[in-house]
Image (tube, rainbow, N blue to C red):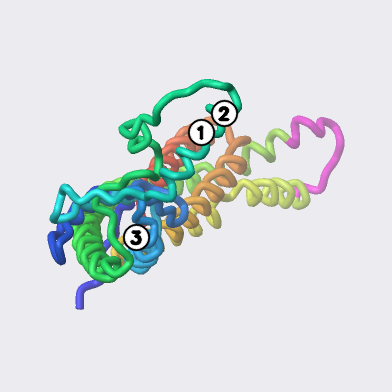
Amino acid sequence: MSAPMLKSMTGYAQARVEQNGWAVQLSLRSVNHRFLDVRIRMPEGWDALETEIRQLTRERIRRGHLDVTVQVEAEKKNSITIHREVAAEYLKAAMSLSEQFGFKADPDVAAILRLPGVASSGAPADDELEALSTVVRSCLGQAIDRLEQMKQVEGRALGAELSARLDNVTQVAQKIEALAQRAQPAYAKRLETRLKELLGNYSLDPNRLAQEAAFAAERSDTTEELARLKSHVQQFRGLLEAGGEAGKKLDFLLQEMQRETNTLLSKTNGIDSGGLEITQLGLELKSEIEKLREQVQNVE
C-alpha cells in the first residue's frame, strides 16, 4: 500500500450530474487556511441541503478555506413556484401605505413577482428533496475526487520545492559548522589576550585566566544549536516523505529551526572576522527557513 501523498490546500474542481429530473452543477475552490472553513453558495430555497453538503465536505477535507458553489436546474425549466402567502403580505403592506398617505394605485403584478421570496424557479417540493439529495451527494463526491487529484499534483510540486530549499538549509548549516569549529580556538586565544590587556598590571593566576577564557569561548559554542537544527531537518524530510496531513507539523519544525538560528546568531555576535562570516550565513539560513514557512502555509 502506497504512503499518503503530500497535498496542497490550493485547488479547483467542478462536476455536473443529471439524475431524477434534476441537473446539479457544483464547483469547489480551495485556498490555504489554518483550519477548515467551508462557505456554501446555493440558490434561494435550497437551504435544506446545506447541512448535508457541509457534513460530506468535512468528512473528506481537513484544512483550507473552501468555497462551494451549487447550481441546480429542474428538468422542466418552465416550472415556477409562486409563494402566494408572501405576495399577500406585500400587497397588504402596499394597501396600508396607500391608506396612510392617501394615494391610489393599482397593484403592479409584475413588480410584485420580482420582490424577494415571491417567485422561485425550479425549487423542489418536500417530497423531492430526498431524490435531489442523492444527486447532490453524487455530484459533490465527484467534485471532491477531482479537487483531491489537483491538490495532490500541486502537493508534488510543493514537496519538490520544499525539499530543494531544505537542501539549501543543510548546506548553509554545514558551512556554519565548519567555520565555527575553526573560529573557536582563535576566539579563546583572542579573548585571553584581551583580558590581559584589560587587567594591565593586575596579577591573575594564569590557570584562572585560561579557565575564564575557555568558559567564555564555550558560551559562544554553537555545537548544540547546529545539532538540533540538523535533527529538525531530518524530521522535516521524514514528514515530506511520509506525506499526508503534515502542514501543521512542518510549520512547528520550522518555528523550532528559526529559534535555533536566532540563538546561533546571538552566540556568534561577539566573534571577530570569522563571526562576521558566520553571521552572514546565519542570516541566509533565516531567509531560507522563512521561505520554507511561506510555502508550508499551503500544505494541508
User: Which quadrant would the N terminus be assigned to in this image?
Assistant: bottom left
Residue located beneath label 3 in the image: 237
Amino acid under label 2? Answer: Glu
> How many neighbours does mark 3 have within 10 angstroms: few (below 14), some (14-19), or many (20 or more)?
some
Q: Could you tell me how far apart the alpha carbons at marks 3 and 2 are, in whole angstroms?
A: 77 Å
User: Which quadrant would the C terminus be assigned to in this image?
Assistant: bottom left
Residue 172: x percent and y percent? 39, 43
Residue 5: x percent and y percent? 26, 64
The residue segment tinted magenta is 195-206
State the SS at label 1: helix
**Marks 1 & 2, CB-CB < 8 Å contact:** yes
The earlier-in-sequence mark between 3 and 2 is 2
Image disc number at residue 99: 2
Q: Could you tell me how far apart the alpha carbons at marks 1 and 3 are, in whole angstroms?
A: 73 Å
Residue located beneath label 1 in the image: 95
**In magenta segment, residue 196:** yes
Amino acid under label 3? Answer: Arg
